[in-house]
Amino acid sequence: MSTKNRKIVLILVIAFLVAAIGAVALFSYLRPMRITMYVFKDSYPAGTAVTDDILVPVLVDENIVYGGKNTDASAAFITKDRKKELVDDKKNFLKIGVLKGMPLAENMLTLNNWSKIQMEMDEDKVAVTIPVDSISGVSNELTYGSRVNIYMSSSDSRGNGTELLFENMKVLAVTKDSYGSLSSATIEVSVAESLSLINAAENYSIYLGLVNGSSYTPVKKDTDNTNKVPVVNPSAEAEK
């Protein structure tokens, strides 16, 4: 091959390489960058612990339209890098209920290690746990969301009778022993109610009465649920 031909071949090779490099660069420029974000596998209520079990990873464009503006997906939703910080290394719960397919965003998380019980409580209420069993707590089927009346009973010098302490109270959680038997119930109460409930639990026998919260009619229509029904004395009733 002559010198002239070698130069022509060299020029063609260089041109081909330049064209190839340009094509790759153009493809890389035009191809959208992809990142991993997460959506919910199913619908979940507020208070659900956020774990890998309820999340599905999906690939999306790095730049998205969010709220009518072009933005970085990582600024709107939790991506792979932030998931380790907010989900893998820290126990977080949902502040709101979510639907299947919704993307996981930081404003959905408690970000402060709240427990599920705290997520279920009204802001101005407190949670008080009292000891009960399958008899005093109605049954082992008592569960979160149950509505109960709370009674205190005594048969000693403090008064032989039973008193209705509170009505239509929300059960936030129950605890069972190693045999599966009910051992305690956590009740949502106001601060004033908590004092009465703790005092009753310390000094009297506590019984729960299961009620239908949606249709229950209070015996006493009190605004703070602290007025009590008069003590029922079985002995006095029998004498009548």
Image (cartoon, helix red, strand yellow):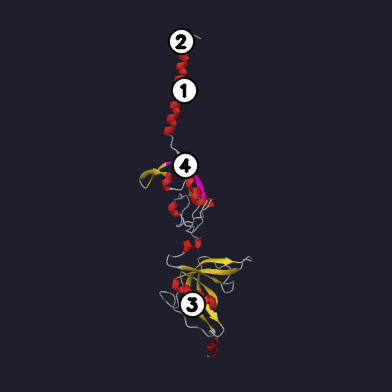
- Tell me the residue at 44%/51% (across/down): 106
Residue mark closest to the camera, 4 vs 2: 2
**Residue 63: image location, x then y, percent:** 41, 41
Q: Which mark is residue 165?
A: 3
Residue at which label 2 appears: 4
Q: Kindly give the residue lying farthest to the left in the view shown.
A: 68
Instruction: Name the amino acid type tagged 1.
Output: Leu
Q: Distance between the residues labelled 1 and 4?
A: 31 Å
Taking the image as drawn, is residue 16 in sight? yes
Q: Residue 35 carries which label?
A: 4
Q: How far apart are marks 4 and 2 (CA)?
A: 51 Å
Q: Which mark is residue 17?
A: 1
The 10 Å Cα crowd at callout 4, few under 14, some 14 to 19, many 20 or more, is some
Of labels 1 and 2, earlier in sequence is 2
Segment tinted magenta in the rendering: 55-62
Of labels 4 and 3, earlier in sequence is 4
**Residue 155: image location, x then y, percent:** 56, 83
Taking the image as drawn, is residue 167 in sight? no
**Residue 194: image location, x then y, percent:** 47, 72
Q: Is mark 2 on a helix, strand or loop?
A: helix
